[in-house]
Image (cartoon, rainbow, N blue to C red):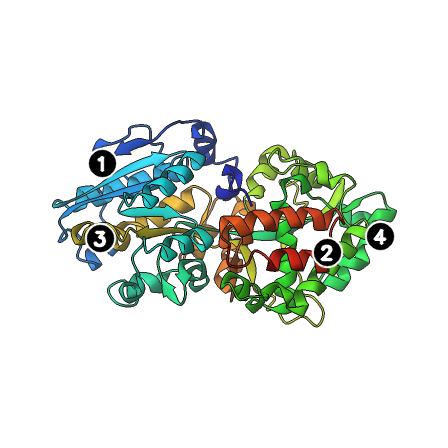
Amino acid sequence: MDPTTSRRTFLRIAAGGAAAAGLAACGSSGPKSSTGSTGSGASAAPAGSSAAGASTGASAAAGGGSVTGNASYWFLNGQPQQGVRENQVKRFNSSHKGASLKSTEFQNDAYKQKIKTAIGAGQAPTLIWGWGGGGLKSYVDANQVVDLTDWVNGPAASLKSKIFPSAFGAATVNNKVYALPVETVTPIIFYYNKNAFEKIGAQPPQSWGDVMDLVPKFNAKGIAPFSLGGQSRWTNMMWLEFLLDRVGGSEVFLNVFNGQKGAWSDPSVEKMLTMVQDLVKQKGFIKGFSSITADSNADLAVFYSGKAAMMVHGAWTYGTMKSQGGNFVKSGALGYMNFPPVDGGKGDPSDTTGNPGQYLSISSKSSAEEQAVAKQFLLDNTLDDASIKDWVGTGAVPVVQGTRDQLAAQPDKMDSDWLTFNYDIASKAKVFQQSWDQALPPTQAEVLLDNIAKLFQLQVTPQQWISNMNAVIGK
């Protein structure tokens, strides 16, 4: 799944000023350095943001101010997230007189190349912003990041207890924690168009059997059962992620992630792939889906215009549907739920998939003094009260337990219902599976996306798909 801005930006509620600021600021270019309060003046603090220097309970509890020295921190620009990150650095620098954190900001694609080059050269910043999963594992394999296991279970235990437990999966490699989950969660959602369901007199599906029963009913009414931006490939992948979990449970993909030889040969994989192709053959997706792109939001338009009845897509699409879908969201026609279970499947129906958080690691090449500054920043300013308020102000769900009341307090009832729904999904999930193309190393991820596209186009059989994927495990 190519990490486009739209996928990384969770829930841009168009009515919110913060979201508008974010969209307007996405075009800023090039890296930019800052040392907190003396740094960039371009930061557009999100709604509800805290000013630099705001004290926090977390800081006092952690004894903030005792650490001394300097450290560096690279992260992505683009509002409204940029403003939250900049405020965190400003608060740290103003409340720790003997310490300084210097931040440098990059656009998404530039960052990927810069951080890869810097880590390879042993010149990484002290704090490394990332997506966890396969990228983090490559850093671990190269001994480039610090093992944080003892720290998160010791000095940072209180902070760890605030974070959704499911977010640590993408931070863990070989049963050791190498990153701290921070920022926000973005689950994948099963959307349905209530108007379309009224036209056929049906209720939302409660099982995979219901899904397949609905397909001919919608087709008979000239409504496509599902919208899909198949040209983008990663949109297809979300179907495999959910179906494999529901059929075989979370352990099946975990074996793939751990590099177990032949892991894709688990019988539940072939069953899942066959179910996907059955849905394609039954005309479950809108005609021409392989030519529809998600990055242009064409798949969303198919859904909110009523040409398709259902859609499996990221939580980040809510804001776009609200801003571009006319009266669709405002009229209450948008329905949403977690992906339904598969009859007889081993998976837990509370499990979800998507982006369980963003992750901060510490470079193993940094000095002990730099590492101490970085850890103090993680303790004091990444998930403190001010940060949580800022993230909620952007219209996002922080990766923090106990924020449901803040999300429910949003003035727009539809927004508050949406936010609390996402909070419940993330907080109750026993497993929050990271998107496969982020969880796997780049080589495997590219082969995966290529074969998923062929699967949906019926160009490979399930057996061929499994053979192709087994061939790249460990690469």
Disc nearer the start of the sequence (2/4): 4
Closer to us: mark 1 or mark 2?
A: 2
Q: Which residue is mark 1?
A: 35
> Residue visible at 26% across and 47% down?
126
Q: Label 4 crowding class (10 Å Cα cut-off): few <14, some 14-19, many 20+?
A: some
Q: Which residue is mark 3?
A: 371
Q: Label 1 crowding class (10 Å Cα cut-off): few <14, some 14-19, many 20+?
A: some
Closer to us: mark 2 or mark 4?
A: 2
Closer-to-camera residue (459/172): 459
**Position in image of residue 315 (x %, y %):** 56, 47
**Position in image of residue 297 (x %, y %):** 62, 35
In this rendering, the answer to whether 405 lies above or below 320 is: below
- Could you tell me how far apart the alpha carbons at marks 3 and 1 are, in whole angstroms? 17 Å
Secondary element at image label 3:
helix
Question: For the residue marked with disc 4, what is the amino acid?
Answer: Lys
Specify the label residue 276 is tagged with: 2
> Residue visible at 43% across and 51% down?
135
Q: Label 2 crowding class (10 Å Cα cut-off): few <14, some 14-19, many 20+?
A: many
In the shown orientation, is residue 92 left or right of residue 441?
Answer: left
In the shown orientation, is residue 230 left or right of residue 114?
Answer: right
Disc nearer the start of the sequence (1/2): 1
Q: Which residue is mark 4?
A: 217
Disc nearer the start of the sequence (4/3): 4
Question: For the residue marked with disc 2, what is the amino acid?
Answer: Val
- Could you tell me how far apart the alpha carbons at marks 3 and 2 are, in whole angstroms? 47 Å
